[in-house]
Image: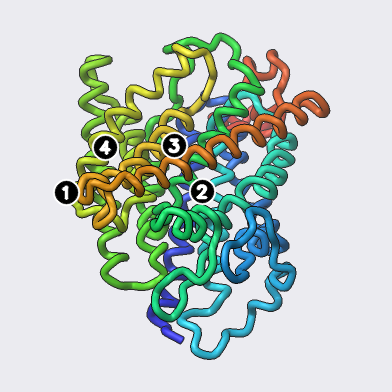
Amino acid sequence: MDQGNTAFILIAAALVLLMTPGLAFFYGGLVKAKSVISMMMLSFGALGLIGVLWVVYGYAIAFPGSEGLVPPWSIDWNAVGLSALIEVPEGAAYPPLAFVAFQATFAILTVALVSGAIADRAKFGSWMIFAAIWATIVYFPVASWVFNFGLAEDGSFAYGGWITYGMQEWFGVGAIDFAGGTAVHINAGAAALALALVLGKRVGFQKGVHVPHNPPFVLLGAGLLWFGWFGFNAGSELAADGTAALAFVNTIAAPAAALLAWLVVEKFKEGKPTSVGAASGAVAGLVAITPACASLDPVWAIVLGFIAGAVCALAIELKFKWGFDDSLDVVGIHLVGGLIGTLYIGFFAKATGLVWTGDPTQLLVQTIAAVAVLVYSFVLAWVIGFAIEKTIGFRVKNEDEVAGIDTVLHGEEGYVLENTRA
């Protein structure tokens, strides 16, 4: 067992886990002051719930192993509860549970990302029910499609999900998603769009009405997300090697460029670059580079960052033009950014991209993967959300939304300046 790589994976897992509290700060700063506790609790609720489900059965669904093409919906019954994975096989590069821990943090974060679309108006209990069902029938299987693959001794695919191994067999190249452009960001962004449509618009929804109450929280959250993203991207190599180093550098370059691009667009649109824009631009670049971080030279990562920052800065306006209330721009940043990064690989991936080879196959398989995950996640998220809304209710009462839902749902206030009960 390679103790160096084992330590690398465990440290990367810890970094990715920190991203969920970072997301809570990022989202919490974007909502109004009387909803900050509720918003942050959606992330922490996902952390607790998905952490348990992953151990009980989530990993068994996401990584069923098997030989050849793994069916889209399968489970490794021996991995339920993880007891069978405690022993380290002879000759293993790292303990199986190190990989389990690393992938657990991906599942937690992906579910938490969805919550940004329903800020200020969602019941906590209903959210937890949605999160449990969506993770079970959407995230865990999609993770299997993308991340569940094994290699033979000669380096060829031995088994895997249909997005990687399947398309490798059918088209000669598999879809490239190094750290989760499809499984994490397109997946979460599509679900966010579905929930925004199910819950409807916030009271008084229009441009300029709902403004971030705490930009310093937003910047803190973005900083924690960026810090954790090094574990997200470089850690996906599962080894401290040259590929991990390339992913690490690209995780600096792309979001830095996206931050600048967002600020330029904001300057032209609004007349002033903002702190929230800087934070949002960095996150947009991080999203876009996620699937491509090991497939691009750093200069092309910068180009991707500029494109993602500019396009996402424009895409967040779509909710006002098309009339859906994606509260915290999960669609404009994660869905659009995930699509940009995933499709960009088809053009500029080293050795297989259209620009370098003249062969459109890589672009074709990237498109198939992106569309399949988008449609699958959107449809099932809409069905789950609609069923919850029509049964126990998903949205709070309008009067509670206007007053602020922290005290209604959690009996707490985010900011208590004076103890009036003393």
Residue 183 got which mark?
A: 2
Residue 334 got which mark?
A: 3
| Residue projecting furthest to the bottom | 90
Q: What is the CA distance from the residue labelled 1 to the residue labelled 3?
A: 22 Å
Determine which residue is flagged by label 4. 258
Report helix, strand or loop for mark 2: helix
87 vs 184: above or below: below
Question: Which residue type carries mark 4?
Answer: Ala
Give the color scheme: rainbow, by chain, secondary structure or one colour. Answer: rainbow
Question: Which residue type carries mark 3?
Answer: His
For residue 93, side relative to residue 407 (left or right) = left
Question: Which residue type carries mark 1?
Answer: Val
The answer to which of marks 1 and 2 sits earlier in the sequence is 2
| Eye-nearest disc, 4 or 1 | 1
| Residue projecting furthest to the left | 299
Q: Residues within 10 Å of mark 2 (few under 14, many from 20)?
A: many
Image spot of residue 23 (x, y percent): 48, 43
Image spot of residue 89 (x, y percent): 57, 86
Q: Nearer the viewer, residue 277 or 180?
A: 180
Looking at the rendering, in which quadrant would you find the C terminus? top right
Q: What is the CA distance from the residue labelled 1 to the residue labelled 2?
A: 25 Å
Looking at the image, can residue 68 be seen?
Answer: yes
Image spot of residue 180 (x, y percent): 45, 51
Q: What is the CA distance from the residue labelled 3 to the residue labelled 4?
A: 13 Å
Residue 299 got which mark?
A: 1
Residue drawn 59% across the image and 71% down it:
67
Asked where in the image residue 373 lies, by quadrant, the reply is top right
Q: Residues within 10 Å of mark 3 (few under 14, many from 20)?
A: many
Q: What is the CA distance from the residue labelled 4 to the residue labelled 1?
A: 13 Å
Q: Residues within 10 Å of mark 4 (few under 14, many from 20)?
A: many
Question: Which residue type carries mark 2?
Answer: Ala
